[in-house]
Amino acid sequence: MGVMNTISLYIIPFIIAVILIHGTWKKVPTYESFVEGGKEGVTIAVQLIPFLVGMLVSISIFRASGALEFCVELLRPLLASLGIPAEVFPLAIIRPISGSAGLSITADLIKTYGPDSFIGRLASTMQGSTDTTLYVLTVYFGAVGIRKMGDALKVGLLADALSIIFSIVFVTIFFT
């Protein structure tokens, strides 16, 4: 077993032990604090459910209605002129909204075109380099009551856009 495997095996128990020892030294009721944190976690999870359901239903409607496919076909000539496979466009649109929907699209692309194809590599790179920005803002910001999220939205979508652009650039450079 390598050094990193050994470290990773013992780091979590070590951190927990340090927290418990520090809490005991500071005379904090560690077990009671743990239970209280668990209660708070369950409360937050219940508060997240409406936001999560709303987001998942919206994505399902968008995909099932054919609106996503319509957008792909509409942009196919432009994407082709830029050297971007239209097949990855749904992933670029859905990934900032939902991680599970993005993963589903990525899995479909890999199943259809293969993991070593340009499209498979591009989809995998996009999946790994982008985040679920709208999902995070909707669910987590909504759960804690943050209503003004304009700057976070701008920065998150900019990061996603740059990730998609650099995914295309680097996969093109390294795999064509």
Image (cartoon, grey):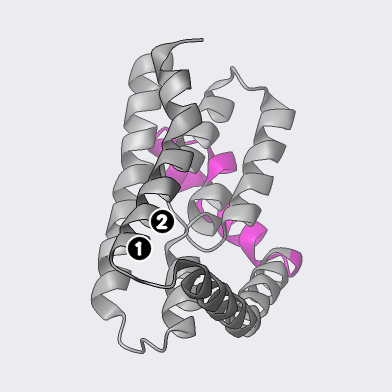
Q: Is residue 176 visible?
A: no
Labels 2 & 1 near each other (Cβ < 8 A): yes
Mark 1: give few (<14), some (14-19) or many (20+) Cα within 10 Å.
some
Q: Is residue 102 visible?
A: yes
Q: Nearer the viewer, residue 62 or 19?
A: 19
Circle 2 sits on which residue? 20
**Residue 73 x/y as whole percent:** 60, 52
Circle 1 sits on which residue? 23
Rendered view: 133 above or below 112: below
Q: Residue 119 lies in what quarter of the image?
A: top right
Which residue is pictured at 33% across the width and 42% down the height?
Answer: 165
Magenta residues span 64-88
- Report the side of 35 relative to 158 (left or right): right
Q: Nearer the viewer, residue 163 or 41?
A: 41
- Secondary structure type for disc 1: helix
Q: Amino acid at mark 2?
A: Leu
Which residue is pictured at 28% across the width and 58% down the height?
Answer: 158
What is the C-alpha distance between the residues marked 2 and 1?
5 Å
Rendered view: 11 above or below 44: above
- Secondary structure type for disc 2: helix
**Residue 106 x/y as whole percent:** 62, 40
Rendered view: 157 above or below 10: below
Queried whether the magenta region covers residue 73, the answer comes back as yes
Rendered view: 16 above or below 2: below
Q: Residue 120 lies in what quarter of the image?
A: top right
Mark 2: give few (<14), some (14-19) or many (20+) Cα within 10 Å.
some
For the stretch drawn in magenta, the main secondary structure is helix
